[in-house]
Structure formats: structure tokens, C-alpha cells
Amino acid sequence: MKEALRENVASLSPVITEFEKPFWNSLQNGQLMVQKCPECGHVQFPPSPVCSNCLSDTVQWVNCSNKATLWSWVAFHKAYLEPYGDVPYGVVLAKLEEGPIVTGRMSAETVSTTAFDAPLRATYVKTADGTVLVEFVPEK
Amino acid sequence: MNGKFPAGVAVVGVGDIEFGKLYKEKNLTEPRDPYKMAAEAFKNALDDAGLKKQDIDGVLCVRDIKKYEYFCYKVGIDKPRLVNGLESAGRQSGLALQYAAMAIASGMVKTVAVVYSNHSRTAAFNYGGDGDGGDPFGILHGMTSPGAQVAAMFNRYRHEFGASEESLGKVAISNRYHASLNPKSVMTKLISMEDYLGARYITEPFRLFDYCLINDGAVCIILSSIERAKDMRKPVVEMIATSACGDMASSYMKEDFFYKGVQLVANDLYATAGVKATDMNSLQIYDNFTATILYSLEGLGLCDRGGAGHYIDTVGITHGKSPRPVNTSGGHTSETYMQGFNHQVECVRQLRGECGARQVPDSKLSLYICAAPIISGHIFARR
Ligand SMILES: [Zn+2]
């Protein structure tokens, strides 16, 4: 299924806290952010209110480079989630250039034909209900 | 108590119920009562130990009876000196025994019943659909269930170490063979590699036979001091080592396939017990999914990293062939998914010599390990 046809994805969205709001706003505007600590340089994702390395509370949201490599993937042949009834569908674990591993969209066909560690690029797709998802595509 | 903790702590009673019989009962219109199953397992464990309920001064309740007050009321234990409930995740089973051992060794209590009950099959519990605790971003993108996380790990593992899907098949086939020797098992029909590879994918690369069974059941394990154990009904089984280690990350998926955490726990176990991995007569390895056995064999130090497939082919994991068979009761994929409790019971029964056709001759040492976000393990010894 094209991500643009996917419905009711927002039903899977977490309760967004005041602290995480900038992250989700940015995603909705088509940019994945990670956190960088100005004190020690540590980069982290998913977000934390403090630097998980030095506990500094001055961590900053920074745009990721959108560059990643394929760390692993899984193809769901069983439908667990209502918006993802289109089995088999793929999920990719992409290792960002900045270090953290991020879960994103990728079709079952693309995941199984893309090499491990192959370069990927993060793109942003809007689903039928307006939720923005990260879709990784092989870098040409 | 003497020696290094947990030396001096013994398992004195084990009780479970007929998992296979329950599984075959169809057409139930209501979920099974988890307290009823728990009470049956509790009575069986008391009988096994030759104890009365008045001898129990500690109760730890796990999973579907975590309303511990209600369970204690139902079995008439009104003033336990240790009582609590633990969450439903399978990682709790090893920890529950560890907490019981700590309480006994400290002198807080004399005899603890750890009681577990699971009615998820007839209550139609939706395993896998609630995402993955720490990672709300993943579920939004369609990622859910520990199975998918471990499947993605196996995919990476396969890439890094050249493992084959047949290595998972061999685990599933061996588990099923052991289950065929265990009259209590849910699944007893032997499977071939053709059956394994021909089964449908659930979360590719995992197929049907890589998955634990969802079924109803209950288990009770009673622990006490070794001095008291000597006066009880069954041969004494001492817990000679126990250890745990959190493997904390933003999701169930671990980039090192639980290697460092299992290694830390295993090294603790060997050092405490003064034994080696190869001294074990059987290994009971938590297998929510077959691949977890591969990761565990490596962390236990029985083979090099990435060498589990080779270990299975050369040393072996199957009763009658391996010097230390793995999951002699059939494990989670074939005996029953009692979330590690059935594995710990099997350690005890092997050491007592109660295992009939699947008995490992002259069993002196048996190891339990669970690779999960909290890794735990024990070594038990026949005394
Ligand atoms: Zn920092």
C-alpha cells in the first residue's frame, strides 16, 4: 500500500507531552529531529528530557541529516495494527548517520531487496489521515 | 545459611497443570479462571513438597493473578510475611525465584510460594498489538510485538554471522521432539525441516514454529532453606547460583543480540557456583522465539559469537545426542508458554530424575537463562 492511502494512522500516535511537542511538530512538517547535547556532544533518539550520557538538561533538538543505512528489517505477515492491515508490509530499522537506530516505513518488497548497510534517505509521506511518517528509500 | 548467596536456598515443591489437556478443550464460552488454575498448581506444589499451606509465609503472584490479595484470600493465606505481585512479562519468572531466594536467605521468611497463572488463550489476550513500551515512534510506523523485534534482530544477526534459517528450524524441531516425550505438552506431533520451512511467516524471517504457543495454564514453585528441604518429600534441589542484569534500551531490540548481558549473568553464575558451562547436564533456555536460544548459547559461552548454528550442528541440543540438551520439556514453542516457569520446573524435575522418556541420565546440574530486557539465570544442583 502507498503510505498516502493509509488511513487512521493517528490512532497509533502517542499522547504528546509539552516536552516532546517540538519533535512531533517538526515531523509533521517533514523533518525528523534527534537530540544533541551541547555539553558532551552525545546524540540520542528516541528523545529524553536529559542527556542520557551526562544528564545535562540542555539537550537540543537538531534536524537529522536524513542519511542512514539499512540496519535490519522485518516483514509483517500478520496484521496486529488496524492501520497496517495490508500484510505483508515491511518495516525498516535504519541507522542514522548520527548514530541512533530509527524505525521507519519501507515496503516489504523494497526491504527484502535492499542490501544490509546500504545507504538510505529519509523521506516524509503524508497518510490519508494527515499523519506524517518517515519512509526510507534506497539512496541512488 | 552457609556459602555464598543463594547457596542454602532450595526448591522444595513444583506444581503445574495439564497444559496439553487444557489446550485440547474446545468450545469454552468464558475465559478460564486464572485463580482456579493457580489454586490447582499451588495445591500440586504443596503436595509435591509435602507441605501444608500453613507452612507458606511468603507469596509472590505473577501475571493474571497479580491481584495478590485476592489470590491469598482465595487460598486462605491471611498473614504472609512477604507478598507482592509481578507484571505479566516473561522476564519476571526468573526474577520471582530470585526475590524468593533473597527473602529466604535474609531470614525474612522461611518458605515462599511463587504462583503464576496465565489465561491469555481463552481470554483472547492480544499479544503483540500494544507496540513496544519505550518506542512510540516504532508503533506509528507499523512496528509492534517482541516477535517482530527479535525477528529484526535475527535478520541482522544472519547478516553479520551468516546464520541460516535452518538453524532456527533445528531448534523448533528439537523442541518438538522433546515435547513428544513429555505427556503434558501442548504440541506433541513431530515436525520436519520441510514442515518448518513450509509454515507461514508471521514476522518474516520468523515463521509459525519460531513462535511460543499461547495457551492457558498455571505453575507454582515453592522455595525454602536447604535445612527444611531435607525434611520434605522430594530429593533436594539447591539453587547454587542466581543472577540478573537489565538490558535497557529504547526497545526490545538489542544491537548486540543480548550478548553482553547474558555473558554478565552467565559469568556470575559460573563464578558463584564454581562450575563451567560444559558441566551442565541440561539447559533450559527461555525461548519466546527460537532465535533467543541462539543468542543465549553464545552469551552462555558455549560457542563463539555467531557460532550457535555450528554448535547446534556439532555439539547438539537434542536429548540422546547432546551432552547437555536444551529445553528437554519442549520449551515455549512446543511444551507450553508458561513464560519461563515451565523451564524452571523442568530444571527441578531433571535433577530429581522425574522426567521419564526425556530424562537426562545422572543429572546433577541444570541451568536456566532468560534473554529479555531483564536477563536472569540460575544454576540448580541435585543434593
Ligand atoms: Zn551530554
Image (cartoon, coloured by chain):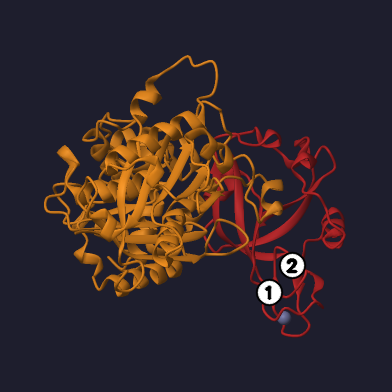
Chain colours: A red, B orange
> Amino acid type of disc 1?
Ser
Q: Are marks 2 and 1 in contact (CB under 8 Å)?
A: yes
In this picture, residue B295 sits left or right of residue A1: left
Residue at image position (29%, 32%) is B184
Residue at image position (28%, 51%) is B347
The spot of residue B40 in percent (x, y) is: 40, 31
Answer with the quarter of the image where residue B190 lies. top left
The spot of residue B257 in percent (x, y) is: 46, 62
Question: What is the chain identity of the residue bearing mark 1?
Answer: A
**Circle number at residue B171:** none
Ligand 1 within 8 Å, label 1 CB: yes
Residue at image position (27%, 42%) is B50
- Residue, disc 1: A52
In this picture, residue B351 sits left or right of residue B342: left
Element type at mark 1? loop
Residue at image position (78%, 69%) is A49
- Rate crowding at label 1 as few (under 14), some (14 to 19) or many (20 or more) other CA atoms within 10 Å: some
Q: Quick one: which residue is furthest to the left in this view?
A: B361
- Residue, disc 2: A48
Total labels drawn = 2
The spot of residue B28 in percent (x, y) is: 49, 16
- Residues A125 and B66: in front is B66
Element type at mark 2? loop
Say if residue B266 shows up in the picture: yes
Q: Which quadrant of the render holds ligand 1?
A: bottom right
How far apart marks 2 and 1 lie (CA) works out to 7 Å
